């Protein structure tokens, strides 16, 4: 019998986890730099919290089950409903605006393609209770900062900004009724990934005539906010918002990271205003992160209405991109000291040495058995240790510690007691 992880789920061996931790550090440091606080919630939620009507792909991908008492539960496919739930629970007590982040593992029964797994870790950054555009700017600034700290610049990725509100204005300008707008958004969001005849069929299924379909699809050839304004007969509050966002990103020094793109619509129904997705410049990979403004989710889940902005940034696509660009940082193990000993007689001395160094907060790997010098030094070199200490009968008798700097190849002996004060670079 041979077991493998379920399809689409990953094991993390230590070298994989070092890489994942480096990404989590970049996320966490960027979030803290922008003044976000970390929160968490259970990976299992009530199924009802996660389900929305309206044909979103994510809802069909939920892993759900009944527990032993027959409660309908599910593995979260995303964090946003859990965030909404915990905010609603303390809505009267929390001081707004909230700037919160989290790194949840999320589960979706996805069709397996590049960049998509059935579990992924997703950095979530959300601002709750702020209607001003600086909320969008701060969330985007933190996400861009994280990517920069991984060695990526505007030459490697770009954030594309769209607006559900602008799309709704354009849609109305075509003389179409609002009731099917959300369905149209979900079809247009998928457009790039499906053949044109399927898009056409999906819109026909929603009840649109061929002429109406042509009009809806023609909106996707709009290139700039000026084009939008021409179509709408002038500037609107929503076109001004996008222009202001672009100006604020410029003030943050991030103008070259941002571009308006009407085709950014997002596949989740709760977004209400500005939406965005980041892509690698060559468009080889799926979205690196995506998010937007969602002002009605809390009220739709029974809370008071609060404006929200946020994004989700998965661990899969960015790792594919970093690998493709050869931008992975050194992921070898780091260790300050390896300590080994020749015979069982030196074991207590080796333990004393390791303990003393650990008390000084060094990372120390102590051999578990006596071993020959050659074997010990080979292993010490492989472990990435900076210093190797190998203890034989002479050292134990004289309470002397032989320390080899594996990077420089230099060796010296020190009395055990001197280890308490010796500085190690
Ligand atoms: P989403 O676009 O569904 O948004 O996911 C956000 C990001 O998570 C994607 O851009 C991608 O990086 C990653 N991701 C999603 N699904 C997978 C998958 N199956 N495998 C690997 N990576 C994946 C949301 O989930 C929103 N709740 C984000 C949000 C937070 N909006 C406001 N606040």
Image (spheres, rainbow, N blue to C red):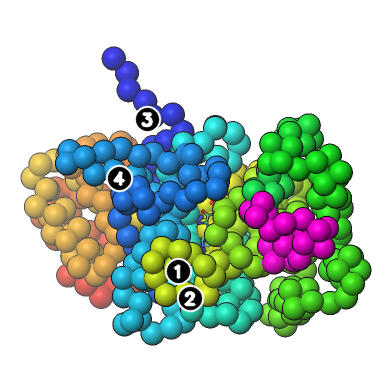
State the CA–CA distance, disc 1 to disc 4.
22 Å
* Image x and y of residue 122, in percent: 47, 54
Please say if the residues under marks 1 and 4 sit with CB atoms less than 8 Å apart: no
> In the figure, 33 relative to 53: above or below?
below
State the CA–CA distance, disc 3 to disc 1.
39 Å
Q: For label 2, count other residues whose C-alpha is less than 10 Å away and answer few (under 14), some (14-19) or many (20+).
A: many
Please say if the residues under marks 2 and 1 sit with CB atoms less than 8 Å apart: yes
In the rendered image, residue 3 lying in the magenta stretch gets the answer: no
Left or right relative to 242: residue 108: left
For mark 1, what is the residue?
299
For mark 4, what is the residue?
73
Q: Which residue is drawn at 77% across and 48% down?
A: 282
Please say if the residues under marks 3 and 1 sit with CB atoms less than 8 Å apart: no
Q: State which tag comes first along the sequence, 2 or 1.
A: 1
For mark 2, what is the residue?
306
Nearer to us of marks 3 and 4 is 4
For mark 3, what is the residue?
5
Q: Residue at x 44, y 68 (%)?
A: 298
> In the figure, 29 relative to 13: above or below?
below
Q: Which residue lies furthest to the bottom in this view?
A: 95
Q: For label 1, count other residues whose C-alpha is less than 10 Å away and answer few (under 14), some (14-19) or many (20+).
A: some
Q: Which residue lies furthest to the top in this view?
A: 1
Q: State which tag comes first along the sequence, 3 or 1.
A: 3
Magenta residues (range): 155-182
CB at disc 1 and ligand 1 closer than 8 Å:
no
SS for callout 2: loop
Please say if the residues under marks 3 and 4 sit with CB atoms less than 8 Å apart: no
State the CA–CA distance, disc 3 to disc 4.
22 Å
Q: State which tag comes first along the sequence, 1 or 4.
A: 4
């Amino acid at each position: 019998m041979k077991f493998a992880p379920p399809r689409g789920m990953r094991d993390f061996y230590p070298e994989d986890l070092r890489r994942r931790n480096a990404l989590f550090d970049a996320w966490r440091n960027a979030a803290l730099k922008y003044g976000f606080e970390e929160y968490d919630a259970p990976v299992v939620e009530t199924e009802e919290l996660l389900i929305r009507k309206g044909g979103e792909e994510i809802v069909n991908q939920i892993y759900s089950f009944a527990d032993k008492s027959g409660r309908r539960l599910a593995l979260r496919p995303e964090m946003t409903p859990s965030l909404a739930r915990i905010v609603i629970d303390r809505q009267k007590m929390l001081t707004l605006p909230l700037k919160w982040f989290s790194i949840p593992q999320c589960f979706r029964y996805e069709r397996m393609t590049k960049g998509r797994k059935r579990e992924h870790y997703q950095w979530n950054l959300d601002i709750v209770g702020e209607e001003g555009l600086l909320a969008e700017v701060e969330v985007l600034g933190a996400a861009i900062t994280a990517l920069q700290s991984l060695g990526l610049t505007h030459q490697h990725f770009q954030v594309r900004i769209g607006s559900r509100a602008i799309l709704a204005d354009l849609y109305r300008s075509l003389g179409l009724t609002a009731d099917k707008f959300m369905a149209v958004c979900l079809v247009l969001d998928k457009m790039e990934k499906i053949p044109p005849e399927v898009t056409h069929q999906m819109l026909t299924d929603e009840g649109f005539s061929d002429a109406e379909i042509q009009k809806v699809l023609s909106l996707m050839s709009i290139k700039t906010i000026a084009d939008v304004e021409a179509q709408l007969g002038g500037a609107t509050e929503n076109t001004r918002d996008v222009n202001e966002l672009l100006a604020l990103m410029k003030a943050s020094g991030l103008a070259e990271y941002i571009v308006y793109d009407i085709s950014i619509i997002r596949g989740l129904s709760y977004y209400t205003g500005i939406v965005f997705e980041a892509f690698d410049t060559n468009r080889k990979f799926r979205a690196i992160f995506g998010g937007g403004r969602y002002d009605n989710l809390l009220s739709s889940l029974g809370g008071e209405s609060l404006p929200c902005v946020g994004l989700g940034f998965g661990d899969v696509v960015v790792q594919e991109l970093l690998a493709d660009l050869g931008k992975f940082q050194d992921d070898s193990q780091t260790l300050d000291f390896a300590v080994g000993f020749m015979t069982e007689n030196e074991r207590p001395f080796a333990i004393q040495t390791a303990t003393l160094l650990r008390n000084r907060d060094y990372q120390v790997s102590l051999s578990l058995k006596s071993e020959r010098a050659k074997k010990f030094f080979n292993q010490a070199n492989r472990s990435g240790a900076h210093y190797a200490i190998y203890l034989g009968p002479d050292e134990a008798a004289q309470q002397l510690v032989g320390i080899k700097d594996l990077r420089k190849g230099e060796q010296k002996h020190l009395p055990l007691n001197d280890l308490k004060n010796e500085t190690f670079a």
